[in-house]
Amino acid sequence: MELLVALVGFLGLLPTALAYGAVSDATLRGLPGPGADFDIDTGALLAPILRPRVSGTEGSRAVLQHFVDFFRGELPEWRLELQNSSSTTPTSKGQPVPFVNLVATRDPPNAGVGDVGRLALVAHYDSKLEPAGFIGAIDSAAPCAMLLHAARTVDKALTKKWAAMAAEGTDDLEDKKGVQILLLDGEEAFKVWSDTDSLYGSRALAEEWENTFNPAASTYKTPLDSIDLFVLLDLLGSRGPTVPSFYKTTHWAYKHMAQIEHRLRDLGLFKSSPNHPLKIAKRKNKNKRKEPLFLNEAAKENGDFYGGYIADDHLPFLARGVEVLHIIPSPFPHVWHDITDDGKHLDMDTVEDWARLVTAFAAEWMDLEGFFDVQTKPTAEVTGKSEL
Ligand SMILES: *[C@@H]1O[C@H](CO)[C@@H](O)[C@H](O)[C@H]1NC(C)=O
Ligand SMILES: [Zn+2]
């Protein structure tokens, strides 16, 4: 079966055949958390993003440089591209404002650029012009940091997997899957959200990619076609989120992510859970509490899917036929577009849980079971598992 699917994919009859593979409990336990790198004052990944970074300003350039330095320094095998555009805005007094998207891609070695289907993990890095001094910690500094953490965590396993495939000679047969981090500029409106005052970066990128052609006889016609799934994170990092399943055609992927959440909670690896061993240890009444769920619609089958209701960076891609998994809480967190959306108002347990969940999802999507350096000794975090 496996081989048949691979061969059919190879023949180009079924180019989007996807081998999604669950990771083991040991792998889930062994996936590193972001730890001190998510400290809001000193964390190497998160702290540099927690500053105003309105498109076209010095803060924006500094945060972009932080991303570039991260990939160049820690993930040299990722191909970096900056996609540029410019537009006037309702507050720019007729002057063009530059918008710069960062695209970081890791493809299997020896694969033609047009023959790789990619998991795109996406967040916006610009912050809102008003209120003055707005940080946008959930919107979307924390999601950007989560993606850096996920990229770093799957990187080594990808290297191992592809080396093993090359050694076995299966690298020509297996479907060619890559992973891509999109850190987008200009999501926020400068004045009032409208079709023209919002999504500056994503509109420019989707349009450019629709009109960029891969080499003739490629499996995928354009970089836009190459996106197997566009996973957009937004407004993540406040306590107690509930994220609906917005699109029927990607409900299957939502269910996979929900299944991972369920397993992480069962394994005592979800720090925001009221039943996490550390939380139980701290309270008198040790009884198990009702387990909340971030992704609480996995059981929805024929219910309503409200994909059209939240405007965000996925829209220009969705309009061009890209499959979207939108990970955004509904209702929006209380700090949304308020000056209080800063580092101090992040719920760090929740931020860390999202980072772990998204990382595990990427690991399953990329079929990386067996390629992580998994610790054999249980960590302190999971020794209380029997209490769950
Ligand atoms: C986009 O602009 C940056 C400078 O901000 C430049 O380094 C980069 O090469 C440009 N990208 C393209 C594709 O022209
Ligand atoms: Zn916003």
Image (cartoon, rainbow, N blue to C red):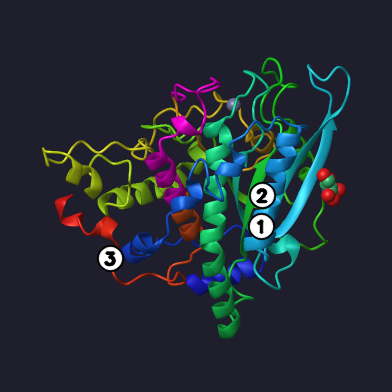
Q: Is residue 286 left or right of residue 80?
A: left
Q: Residue at x 50, y 55 (%)?
A: 362
Mark 2 or mark 3: name the one nearer the start of the chain: 2
Q: Say what secondary structure mark 2 lies in.
A: helix
Q: Is residue 369 above or below residue 69?
A: below
Image x and y of residue 170, in percent: 58, 79
Which portion, as a residue range, is magenta? Answer: 331-357
Q: Amino acid at mark 2?
A: Phe
Judging depth in this view, the residue of 164 and 65 nearest the camera is: 65
- Categorize mark 3 by other alpha carbons within 10 Å: few (<14), some (14-19), many (20+): few
Image x and y of residue 139, in percent: 56, 31
Q: In this view of the protein, can residue 232 be seen by the observer?
A: no
Give the total of numbered labels.
3
> Cβ(mark 3) to ligand 2 < 8 Å?
no
Assess whether mark 1 and mark 3 are in contact (beta carbons under 8 angstroms): no
Spatial CA span between label 2 and label 3? 33 Å
Spatial CA span between label 2 and label 1? 6 Å
Q: In this view of the protein, can residue 153 be seen by the observer?
A: yes
Image x and y of residue 115, in percent: 70, 63
> Cβ(mark 2) to ligand 1 < 8 Å?
no
Q: Is residue 274 left or right of residue 123?
A: left
- Categorize mark 1 by other alpha carbons within 10 Å: few (<14), some (14-19), many (20+): some
Q: Amino acid at mark 3?
A: Pro
Residue 200 in the magenta stretch? The answer is no
Q: Residue at x 69, y 18 (%)?
A: 194
* Residue tagged 3: 378
Residue 351 in the magenta stretch? The answer is yes
Q: Is residue 159 above or below residue 385?
A: below
* Residue tagged 1: 71
Mark 3 or mark 1: name the one nearer the start of the chain: 1
Q: Amino acid at mark 1?
A: Phe
